[in-house]
């Protein structure tokens, strides 16, 4: 008699249902577990390096250039990163390098934002901050600003420099110099 009672309990249907119930419980447990936390990538700072660049500033009479070699930090490797590091140093102004520091004048006031630079082939494109259009410079000051930038960038590489103001093409920066044409080394020779 006991055999007849247990026989329907272990029927094929009941065993199959028990196996499916176990698989469903296992699946539910796997699905409810939180995903494994991915490992953060290791960021190597191998791209950040100190490099020597030549920067150009104005002389005391705003007629010629004072050349300074300085060590700046390039955040990445490459021409654009090196050019941007040079412009950051240029915007910071001349450093104290012996007697030349007294004669060198910064092209923009201390604390001014540095322009950003892009490279298209051998042509630099410099985006000047909008605040540069508010500088109260005459012809010589505007030319010195543009040419000291040009000479600083073309010291290492490049054919010429095109200027934008706040990301837009403009006729002039301060009403004196023409910004339609690119500036080359020859355009910024000492007088």
Image (cartoon, rainbow, N blue to C red):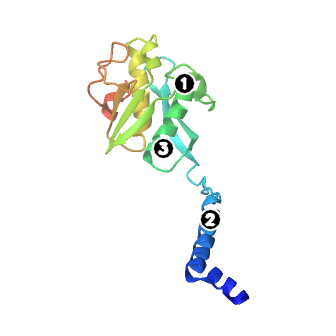
- Answer left or right for 3 relative to 127: right
For marks 2 and 3, the one nearer the N-term is 2
Q: Nearer the viewer, mark 1 or mark 2?
A: 2
Label 2 near label 1: C-beta < 8 Å? no
Q: Position of residue 109 (x, y in %)?
A: 54, 19
Q: Which numbered circle lies on residue 22?
A: none
Q: Quadrant of the C terminus?
A: top left
Q: Position of residue 103 (x, y in %)?
A: 56, 23
Q: Residues within 10 Å of mark 3 (few under 14, many from 20)?
A: some
Give me the C-alpha separation between circle 1 and circle 2.
Answer: 70 Å
Q: Residue furthest left?
A: 181
Decide if residue 62 is in sight here: no
On screen, residue 116 above or below 110: below
Decide if residue 60 is in sight here: yes
Q: Residues within 10 Å of mark 2 (few under 14, many from 20)?
A: few
**Residue identifier under label 1:** 104
* SS at circle 3: helix
Q: Which numbered circle lies on residue 30?
A: 2
**Residue identifier under label 3:** 81
């Amino acid at each position: 008699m006991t055999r007849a009672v247990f026989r329907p309990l272990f029927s094929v249907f009941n065993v199959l249902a028990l196996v499916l119930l176990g698989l469903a419980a296992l699946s539910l447990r796997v699905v409810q577990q939180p995903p494994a936390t991915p490992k953060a990538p290791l960021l190597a700072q191998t791209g950040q390096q100190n490099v020597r660049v030549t920067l150009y500033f104005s002389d005391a009479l705003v007629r010629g250039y004072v050349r300074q070699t300085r060590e700046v930090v390039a955040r990445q490797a490459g021409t654009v990163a090196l050019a941007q590091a040079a412009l950051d140093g240029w915007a910071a102004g001349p450093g104290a390098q012996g007697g030349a520091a007294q004669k060198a004048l910064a092209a923009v006031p201390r604390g001014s934002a540095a322009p950003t630079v892009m490279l298209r082939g051998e042509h630099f494109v410099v985006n000047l901050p909008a605040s540069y259009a508010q500088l109260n410079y005459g012809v010589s000051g505007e030319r010195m600003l543009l040419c000291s930038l040009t000479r600083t960038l073309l010291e290492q590489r490049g054919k010429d420099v095109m200027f934008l103001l706040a990301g837009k093409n403009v006729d002039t920066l301060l009403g004196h110099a023409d910004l339609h044409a690119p500036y080359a080394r020859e355009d910024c020779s000492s007088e």
